[in-house]
Amino acid sequence: RPVPCFEFGNIRWVHSLGAGVDSFLWNREWKEDVLLTKTVGSFGKQISEYCLSYMLRDLQCHDVYGWYQSQRQWKPIPPQPLQSQCVVIYGTGHIGQQLASYLGMFGVQPIGISRSGQMKPHFVKVFPTDQASEVLPKADWVIAALPLTNETYHLFDEQFFALLNNASFINVGRGATVDEMALWDALENRNVRLAVLDVFENEPLPPESPLWQHPNVIITPHISALTSAEEAVDCFLQTLQRIEADEPLCNKVDVQKGY
């Protein structure tokens, strides 16, 4: 049941210091005449570098060579080129587009998944969510960069993971978009061969979570995109100036959509 709306009083504007606004909107009522804006900064760049670091680590066999070095073994393994990978990105907004742009510079042809399926810059193709089954079985990497809404809650469930064929899964969106038990099962049955997880439904991730111990899971503590004090202040002041000048806002949140 939705949490009652905040006691807004005379507040007319709320600004989020992060890109995500689910802490304001998820399972809550929102007063329609209160403006909600979010911080727009270097999140896309940070997330792109985060994803690329783990993709290249895997494709360049860093862990394997680290183990061979510890065993004093000389065993060449050909690295896989990034451009050979089929990469599917869930979320084609600002962050998804920047990630697709970065991947494109390495020769990747990113495929997007969004609610509408509307074509967006830097993607070779965008599918609506209900047609994702056309491309997921071919995916080498699936990167989740989605906000948390009623539609995305546990979107990555048993049915979703069953469509993957030994793919790697990265979540840099919101933790509650993933059914963690379904992900565990997918890791065990090899639908998912590697999971890189920066966000979780409950944070910090509880010590009893089995994900900590899984050999094919990499866990980071929600650091793929951090807001600096300078970025937060700059975005707030720019937004304030635009509001006072009655200018269009690029960071206004659609409270009905939840992002």
Image: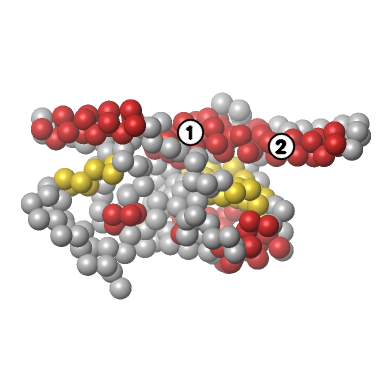
| As drawn, 88 above or below 227 | below
Q: Nearer the viewer, residue 49 or 84?
A: 49
Q: Residue at x 49, y 55 (%)?
A: 204
Q: Nearer the viewer, residue 199 or 150?
A: 199
Q: Nearer the viewer, residue 16 or 110?
A: 16
Q: Residue at x 45, y 38 (%)?
A: 225
Residue 156, disc: none
Camera-nearest label, 2 or 1: 1
Specify the amino acid type for callout 2: Leu
Mark 1, secondary structure of its residue: helix
Q: CA distance from mark 2 to mark 1?
A: 20 Å
Specify the amino acid type for callout 1: Gln
The residue tagged 2 is 59
x and y percentages locating residue 215 in the rendered image: 72, 53
Image quarter hosting the N terminus: bottom left
Q: Residue furthest front?
A: 207
Q: Residue at x 22, y 67 (%)?
A: 4
The reply, left or right, for residue 144 in relation to residue 38 is: right
Is residue 190 visible in the rendered structure shown here?
A: yes
Q: Residue furthest bottom?
A: 1
x and y percentages locating residue 79 in the rendered image: 77, 33
Mark 2, secondary structure of its residue: helix
The residue tagged 1 is 46
Instruction: Classify residue 251 by image quadrant.
Output: top left
| As drawn, 23 above or below 189 | above
The reply, left or right, for residue 244 in relation to residue 81 is: left
| As drawn, 132 above or below 75 | below
Instruction: Classify residue 184 by image quadrant.
Output: bottom right
x and y percentages locating residue 49 in the rendered image: 54, 32
Instruction: Classify residue 152 by image quadrant.
Output: bottom left
Quick one: label 2, few (<14), some, or many (20+) residues within 10 Å? some
The reply, left or right, for residue 226 in relation to residue 251 is: right
